[in-house]
Amino acid sequence: MPVWTLKPVAAATYIPLVELNQNFDSYAYGGDVLTRGIVTYVDSNGFMIQNGSGAYTGIYVYTGYKSYPSVQKGDVVEVYGYPKYYNGLRELSVNPTYGEYYSVVGAAEVPQPAVIPTADYDRPEYQSVLVKFVDAKITGRYDSWYTKLWIDDGSGEAYIFSSSSLPSTLEPGAKFKYFVGVVYVYRNSYEVLPVEYQLYNPAVKVTDVEYYAFMEEVPTRVRATVFNSGSTASNVSFSATFDGVQVYSAEFTLLPGESKVVEFYVVPQSTGSHTLTIIAEESEKIVPVNVIPNPYQLSYGLTPYYERLYNKEMANVTPLYENLTWVVGELTSCGVSLGDLESRIQWINGTMEEIKREYSLYNTLKGLLIQQNPYRNAYYYPVMVHIRKAAMMSRDVMKELEFVLPILHSTYEQVKPICHAPAPGNETPANQTNATPSTNVTIKITKVLIDASHGQYYNPTKTDQNGMATLIENIKNELGWIVDINTEPITYEKLKDYDVLIITNPSQDITDGEAQAIQEFVENGGGLFILGESYYGHVYYKSLNKVVGKYGIQFNNDELMDDDMNTGRKWFPLVGIYNLDHPAMKFLSADHQMYYNGDTLTVSGSVTWLVRGYETAYSEDRDGNIVYEKGSKPIIAAAVEAGQGRIVAYGSSRAISDAYYGHYINTNWPFVKGVLLWLAHQE
């Protein structure tokens, strides 16, 4: 137990939890209060206490971010804290700096949960109270690294949130005998955090449902498996409904240990989201399905649409492709190697040939149908697919042409004076040959490699907010560079073909061999952008320092905090002190602020700082010890030249991800853009 929790009780009036909650607006922000309750729920930032059962008996006690309070369920705790709201949640904030404390003074039975309808879960009186739902059915489920459930006892849905994945048996259609949880408020939205539950477990169960695809007005075969896990034979009543309308029913007998596959057909009448419900005795499965348009019906209207799209796209593509053919011929005759563009130009040529083939097939099939019926104005699906493919490929070719043509023409303008130098007086001397001089130029495009081979949490292979779609698009569109993703062990042979390597905080060790390969890459002229994380995100500082430590940069196992300049919590600080004299900072201004969540750096030698925290910023380690004090303006980004190459270290991998609706990458992009150009020696 922390020493500060043993602080003697100050002179204060004891306020029962029910009175405190019922009159919370009167107590909130008015000074510390003293109360007492039994611990019902504990997390890393605080705990819930309750005095009695039912409405207004509970409250959340906030003890600090990742404070891991020294209490457990059943402890009787005395709390002297500051009543306030946090995003709609009534809480008592305990900060020993202000003389506030909590103290375990005994033990008792955890209060019984209040039995309430699922529809009442979001009533304010049940905040931080143990509640119990009876006979509630699971109506929906969503999974990521967490699980969301929606349950309903017939009165209306309640929303369940678990920060860890819940068992797969908690699927739509399953029914709780009871569900106990505590009511929490997150960002002004109510949710119930699981404590304990029990499902009904009928002997006869629907164990599996198989189908291929649901299409509008097309019979879809469904196969449902029913299993009898009981010890006696069962007469099973089976039914299936689609949006509440029965589509099939049957009765059959299942012996102990026997399973049966029931096959039936569903004919959806409309597209979009629908619900298939299958019931066998007391077992129920709810299957959300998406009905897609009938492709044969769809093709009637889409065929002329894709033909118009093809004609429109090719009207733009054709002159650009002719221009490409011409400029490539000119450059080749001047001895220019297409270099990094060669594979792209080969792809364009091959795709243009494929477009011609697809359009030829379309015209042939279309002609055959017109011969059969000269008045036909719509075509079957097999005809539509060819014109659609041609139209879509023409769009792809257009994108590639828009990328390669400016580079080809820029190169041509550079070599044109050498390759096509005019003869004096615009005449060809008798001793001058018609051979075009070779320029020995190779087209080179800056290439970036983003590592995803070390289990990074912020990872370019992800498609959610932890991915890097915005970063990659910005690099391609604004800088015109090529971006590749690495999923294999890092070697110098792989790195030497790239200009810049980006490594976000790894969760798996960078090996000694990989560190040496990265160092060789940098010292031979490469650029390294290496990013850390907060201790909460498990900064792999040892691996990161294995790479950059020899150059005077150390990632610290801490987290930058700022009580004043932040985006809602101190561990989500804003940063904005820049070394604007450095060329990597040319897109930043003194008043620009960036979202940040990460560690700090310690630098030495010839390392130059780039970004610091504000005067109000400080950093803490995992145990809450201060690493950098307020006023020290901790360094979070730094740059150094190493051999022929360059390194920029930044304490936040989250900063280049799509996290928090893109606020991180969008506010950090002016910094990142300048850094990448500097690393590629293009400042």
Image (tube, grey):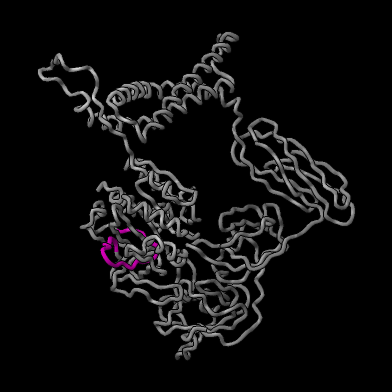
526 relative to 393, above or below: below
Q: Which residues are magenta?
A: 593-611
Nearer the observer, 351 or 563:
351
Q: Position of residue 100 (x, y in %)?
A: 44, 83
Answer whether residue 669 is visible to the viewer in this image: no
Residue drawn 81% across the image and 52% down it: 204
The quarter holding residue 38 reads bottom right
> In the image, is residue 412 part of the stretch drawn in magenta?
no
> In the image, is residue 602 part of the stretch drawn in magenta?
yes
What residue occupies the far front of the structure in this picture? 431
Residue drawn 22% across the image and 32% down it: 414
Answer whether residue 388 is visible to the viewer in this image: yes
Q: Position of residue 172 (x, y in %)?
A: 67, 52
Nearer the observer, 622 or 222:
622
The quarter holding residue 533 reads bottom left
Residue drawn 55% across the image and 24% down it: 385
